[in-house]
């Protein structure tokens, strides 16, 4: 196997990168100055060696505790539960949420062999039971597995006396009703609110 094929194969293993894109990236790197490839390799190695999960929430960080958990400006009484650390960025971009997070590291998926033991649930229950936690927001994806995970967590957290909420779902801003599927419209109707 040539070095070009080897690099393309490694790049193709990344999510969302197919064989054609991997080859395009490989040829781009070959045309670029060698220091560009060196910086990319250094950045990959640095992330691999120095980034770890936050001891409290499971977010990625270079420290033992992530910047969100360490911030004195965050609302300590609310924990937003997400499937993956990348989901935190999506929520943070809105600028609307000021609480803490908890990363499950996936979602329940029995067909893929992912049960409760494979997820970061025990530490979530410990955090939810802490004095001062008033609400746990379940922000799992609106998929079959995400919904099953949210229902499972609701069943575990509710007896702790903590309010459990679910993020709303519905129509995107700028979307047309005629192009939305029935489930999305039903969720939008179910989650309606006063004006």
Image: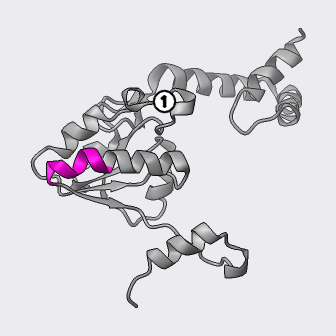
Left or right: where does residue 23 sit relative to residue 16? right
Whether residue 171 is visible here, answered yes or no, is no
- Compared with 4, 62 (above or below) is below
Q: Residue at x 44, y 57 (%)?
A: 92
Q: Quadrant of residue 172?
A: bottom right
Which residue occupies the extreme top position in the image?
A: 1
Q: Quadrant of residue 51?
A: top left
Q: Position of residue 178 (x, y in %)?
A: 72, 80
- Compared with 169, 112 (above or below) is above
Q: Which quadrant would the N terminus be assigned to in this image? A: top right
Q: Position of residue 50 (x, y in %)?
A: 45, 23
**Of helix, strand and loop, which mostly describes the magenta segment?**
helix
Whether residue 131 is visible here, answered yes or no, is yes
Element type at mark 1: loop
The residue range painted magenta reads 154-161
Q: Position of residue 6 (x, y in %)?
A: 82, 15
- Compared with 91, 30 (above or below) is above
Give the camera-side residue of 183 and 172.
183
Left or right: where does residue 38 sit relative to residue 152? right
Q: Position of residue 142 (x, y in %)?
A: 52, 56
- Compared with 125, 114 (above or below) is above
Q: Residue at x 84, y 28 (%)?
A: 26
Q: Residue at x 22, y 52 (%)?
A: 158
Q: Residue at x 26, y 44 (%)?
A: 156
Dot 1 surroundings within 10 Å: few (below 14), some, or many (20 or more)? Answer: few
Give the camera-side residue of 9 and 135.
135
Give the camera-side residue of 68 and 125.
125
Q: Which quadrant would the C terminus be assigned to in this image? A: bottom left
Give the camera-side residue of 127 and 163.
163
Q: Which residue is mark 1?
A: 114
Left or right: where does residue 186 sit relative to residue 155? right
């Amino acid at each position: 196997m040539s070095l070009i094929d080897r690099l393309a194969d490694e790049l193709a293993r990344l999510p969302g990168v197919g064989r054609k894109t991997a080859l395009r990236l490989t040829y781009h790197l070959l045309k670029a100055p060698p220091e560009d490839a060196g910086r990319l390799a250094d950045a990959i190695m640095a992330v691999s060696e120095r980034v770890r999960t936050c001891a409290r929430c499971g977010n990625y960080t270079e420290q033992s505790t992530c910047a969100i958990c360490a911030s004195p400006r965050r609302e300590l009484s609310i924990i937003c539960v997400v499937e993956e650390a990348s989901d935190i960025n999506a929520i943070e971009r809105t600028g609307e949420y000021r609480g803490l997070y908890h990363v499950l590291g996936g979602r329940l998926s029995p067909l893929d062999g992912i049960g409760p033991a494979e997820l970061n649930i025990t530490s979530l229950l410990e955090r939810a039971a802490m004095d001062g936690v008033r609400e746990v927001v379940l922000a799992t994806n609106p998929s079959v597995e995400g919904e099953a995970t949210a229902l499972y967590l609701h069943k575990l957290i509710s007896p702790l006396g903590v309010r459990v909420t679910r993020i709303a779902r519905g129509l995107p801003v700028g979307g047309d009703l005629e192009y939305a599927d029935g489930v999305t419209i039903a969720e939008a109707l179910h989650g309606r609110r006063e004006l």
